[in-house]
């Protein structure tokens, strides 16, 4: 009995892969409103950071990477989101991107 209590109380070390899998499931688990960023969104965040930190051509490249990454993320959410909220979030992001790009013409 002591041995089973001891083994059930031991904590296993959480790996980065464990955190990634849990983050992709979203919070709350039964109706995900937030998830750890997936690769297109991570790319968009990196592009935004580059655009904020740089001038000239590097700034323009960062803006383009941000727009493309966010567009891919939004498209995926609009079509394959896990619930109606995620579909709506993706569609709203697509509308925002189109409006922003139209304003730059």
Image (cartoon, rainbow, N blue to C red):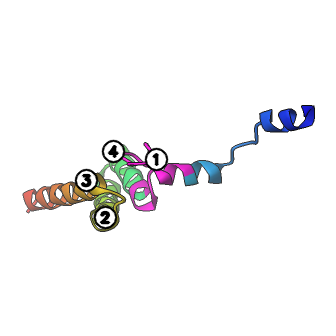
Confirm or deny contact between disc 1 and disc 3 (CB under 8 A): no
Given contact means CB atoms under 8 Å apart, are the residues at marks 4 and 1 in contact? no
Question: Which quadrant, please, contains the C terminus?
Answer: bottom left
Of callouts 3 and 2, the N-terminal one: 2
Q: CA distance from mark 4 to mark 2?
A: 16 Å
Residue 36, how many percent across, how many down? 46, 49
**Residue at label 4?**
52
Toward the front, the furthest residue is: 1
Determine if the magenta segment contains residue 31: yes
Q: Nearer the viewer, mark 1 or mark 3?
A: 1
- 45 magenta-colored: no
The circle drawn on residue 29 is 1
* Label 1, residues with CA under 10 Å away: few <14, some 14-19, many ≥20: few
CA gap, disc 1 and disc 3? 18 Å
User: Is 69 on the left or on the right of 96, as rendered?
Assistant: right
What range is drawn magenta here? Answer: 22-42
Instruction: Write down the residue under mark 2.
Output: 68
Residue 89 is tagged as 3
Q: Earlier in the sequence, mark 3 or mark 4?
A: 4
Seen from the viewer's position, the closer of residues 43 and 64 is 43
Residue 52 in percent (x, y) is at: 33, 44
Disc 2: CA contacts within 10 A as few (<14), some (14-19) or many (>=20): some
Q: Residue at x 76, y 42 (%)?
A: 12
Going from N to C along the chain, the mark reached first, 4 or 2, is: 4
């Amino acid at each position: 009995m002591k041995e089973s209590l001891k083994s059930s109380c031991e904590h296993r070390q959480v790996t980065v892969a464990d955190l990634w899998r849990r983050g992709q499931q979203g919070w709350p688990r039964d109706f995900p409103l937030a998830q750890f960023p997936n690769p297109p969104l991570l790319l968009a965040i990196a592009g935004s950071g580059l655009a904020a930190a740089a001038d000239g051509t590097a700034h323009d490249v960062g803006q383009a990477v941000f727009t493309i990454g966010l567009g891919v993320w939004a498209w995926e959410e609009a079509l394959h989101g896990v619930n109606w909220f995620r579909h709506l979030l993706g569609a709203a992001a697509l509308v925002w991107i189109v409006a922003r790009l139209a304003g730059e013409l």
